[in-house]
Amino acid sequence: MINQKAYDRFEKGRGAQFNPKNKYLKGEYVLEHPEAIDDWEQENRKTEYIFDESRTLVNEVKSPDVGMMWSANPYQGCEHGCIYCYARNSHEYWGYSAGVDFESRIVVKKNAPQLLRKFFENKNWQPAPISLSGNTDCYQPIERKMRITRKLLEICLEYRNPVGVLSKNALVLRDLDIIQELAKHRLVRVFSSITSLDEDLRKVMEPRTASYRSRLKVVETLSKSGVPTGIMNAPLIPGLNDTHMHDVLKAASEAGAKWAGYTVVRLNGTIGTIFHDWLQKAFPDRAEKVWNLICACHDGHVNDSRWGNRISGDGKFAEVIRAQFQLYCRKFGLNQEVFEMNTKDFRRIKNGQLPLF
């Protein structure tokens, strides 16, 4: 259960409760004497959108253990505010903090559709699945207004290039018409991230995400619409949501999911500091236990950069998690089918028109 007294002190709607220093910046603002300052970010910070004219969109993923070759991120930073998000560190490259900045200062790549079209027109491009998004959620709240992800899906359909989608937001159903067309050509697979079924936990761990019930509804709707769909039960946080795995996978299977994956949480870089602060405030009664269990999965540390180990963890506790995941997947009929995306129908479009032959 959430420690209610601790939660009452939270900044509502935010995962991170402070802004740690950006390691790339020399200076920082700090509050040393709060009793002498009347106004120091005392009010909840409003989300700020930074519109960027990016030079590139599609990135090659060279990590051999993440299951994707290419990714495209129309947004940097994520308003969902998930406390454990591995993408937080990337916000430091933009000159911001991985803490509250990450979830309140969102970089919008408004020229992403043009960049994707230009990328597909490059004669050196060999068609391959592109993941939306490999870093931050492509269906976070601002997408409702900007519709950038929808435009990217339209371009993938136009060029017949396969695309994968992973999201925590039910907004993905807005684009069901395009996704169904992609599915007809075996050009899409959609995964929903479902970390638990405990709404109290979600509200403090993933404060601005869709409810778990909504995410299961996404799985059900996509499945009934003929769209290949699955879930990511990730990350599993020992002592917080690892014991929820059975119920999550069962519910996902009943909703129509065909595949499932998982990761064990790893707190690389500044995320460790942010998560530790959150853990002490949200779960003071078991913070030390959870922290030690995470360390037990990463050779005594909260982060492990070794390929493979960093995703599924290492040690006895990680082995228990792995064995349970495999058992439940067999029990609920998950990961029994092999799905290969269609890369044979890719086509380039010259001067905005398809070739006649």
Image (cartoon, rainbow, N blue to C red):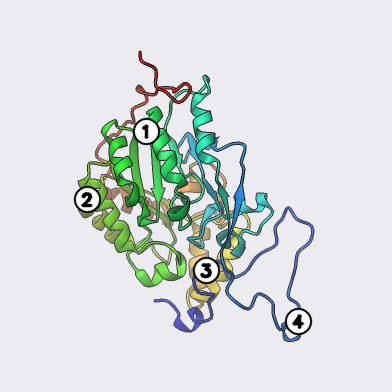
Q: Are marks 2 and 1 in contact (CB under 8 Å)?
A: no
| Residue behind mark 4 | 33
Residue 60 picture location, percent across and down: 54, 34
Residue 294 vertical position relative to residue 113 in the rendered view, above or below: below
Mark 3 to mark 4 CA distance (whole Å): 24 Å
Residue 160 vertical position relative to residue 44 in the rendered view, above or below: above
Under mark 1, the amino acid is Leu
Callout 2: SS: loop
Along the line of sight, the residue nearer the viewer: 301 or 20: 20
Along the line of sight, the residue nearer the viewer: 46 or 36: 46
State which tag comes first along the sequence, 2 or 1.
Answer: 1
Residue 25 picture location, percent across and down: 75, 55
| Residue behind mark 2 | 332
| Residue behind mark 1 | 157
Along the line of sight, the residue nearer the viewer: 332 or 224: 224
Residue 30 picture location, percent across and down: 74, 71
State which tag comes first along the sequence, 1 or 4.
Answer: 4
Farthest bottom residue in view = 35
Q: Are marks 4 and 2 in contact (CB under 8 Å)?
A: no
Is residue 61 at least partly visible in the picture? no
Under mark 4, the amino acid is His
Callout 1: SS: helix
Crowding near pointer 3: few (<14 within 10 Å), some, many (20+)? many
- Quarter of the image with the C terminus is top left
Residue at left 66%, top 49%? Answer: 93
Q: Nearer the viewer, mark 2 or mark 1?
A: 1
Q: Nearer the viewer, mark 2 or mark 3?
A: 3
State which tag comes first along the sequence, 1 or 3.
Answer: 3
Mark 4 to mark 2 CA distance (whole Å): 56 Å
Q: Are marks 2 and 3 in contact (CB under 8 Å)?
A: no
State which tag comes first along the sequence, 2 or 3.
Answer: 3
